[in-house]
Amino acid sequence: MTEASFLPYDAATTDAADRLAEAARAIEALPRAKPSLLPALIEAQHVLGWLPRPAVERVAAWVRVPVSEVYATATAYSELRLERPDPLAWHICTGVACDLAGAEALLDSAPERARRIDCQFLCALAPVAVDPQERLHGRVTVDGLRDRIAATTTDAATEAHA
Ligand code: FES
C-alpha cells in the first residue's frame, strides 16, 4: 500500500477514471437542478475523498451552474476539500478550548504533519487531534502527538514496502 492509496482518488492511479465515473454516477443520481449543488459536492467528495477539478466541472454541468459558482459554494464549507489531503496529516483543533489547552504547542511540535481544524465539539477533552484515519484523540500532549505521528508514519512506510 502506498501513501497515496490512503485516498480514494489520485489522478495518477490506474483507477482514476473509474473513480471519476463512480462520482459522476453519484452526482447524476441527484435531481438535475441548482438545489442539488451542495448534495452533489458532498457525494463527489464522499466517493473521491476530495474535489478535484474534473469533479467540480461535472457538478457544474449536472446542476447547470457556472464552475465559478461551484467553487464559491465549495469554498464556503470547511468540510469540503478542494486540495488533495495529505494522507498522513494530523489535524489539531484550534477552537477556543483547545487553543487555551495548548493547541499551538501541538502545531509547533509537528509542523510537517499537523494542520489546523475548527472545533470538533469535544471541548471537554481539549486539546483534541484527529488522526489520518479520522479518529479523534483527546487531551493530547506534545510528546503523545509526536509518538503517534511517528507510529502512523512508520505504519504507512511499512505498508508501502509490504
Ligand atoms: S475547541 Fe477543540 S474540540 Fe472544541
Image (cartoon, helix red, strand yellow):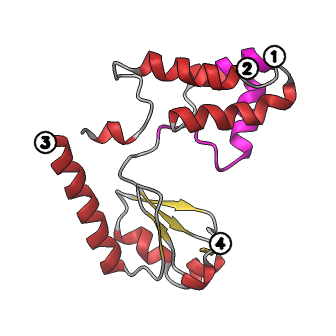
Task: Residue type at mark 2: give it.
Answer: Ala
Real-space Cα separation, disc 2 to disc 3, in angstroms: 40 Å
Query: Badge 1: how crowded within 10 Å, few (<14), some, or many (20+)?
Result: some
Q: Residue at x 24, y 64 (%)?
A: 151
* C-alpha gap between disc 3 and disc 1: 45 Å
Is residue 13 highlighted in magenta?
no
Q: Residues within 10 Å of mark 3 (few under 14, many from 20)?
A: few
For the N terminus, give its image quadrant.
top left
- Please report contact status of discs 2 and 1: CB closer than 8 Å, yes or no: yes
Measure the C-alpha gap from mark 3 to mark 4: 37 Å
Tag 2 or tag 4, which sits nearer the N-term? 2
Region of the chain picked out in magenta, as a range? 57-84
Q: Is residue 37 above or below residue 109?
A: above
Q: Is residue 133 left or right of residue 73?
A: left
The residue tagged 3 is: 161
The front one of 155 and 146 is 155
Q: Which residue is mark 2?
A: 60
Mark identifier at residue 121 = 4
Task: Report the image quarter containing ligand 1.
Answer: bottom right
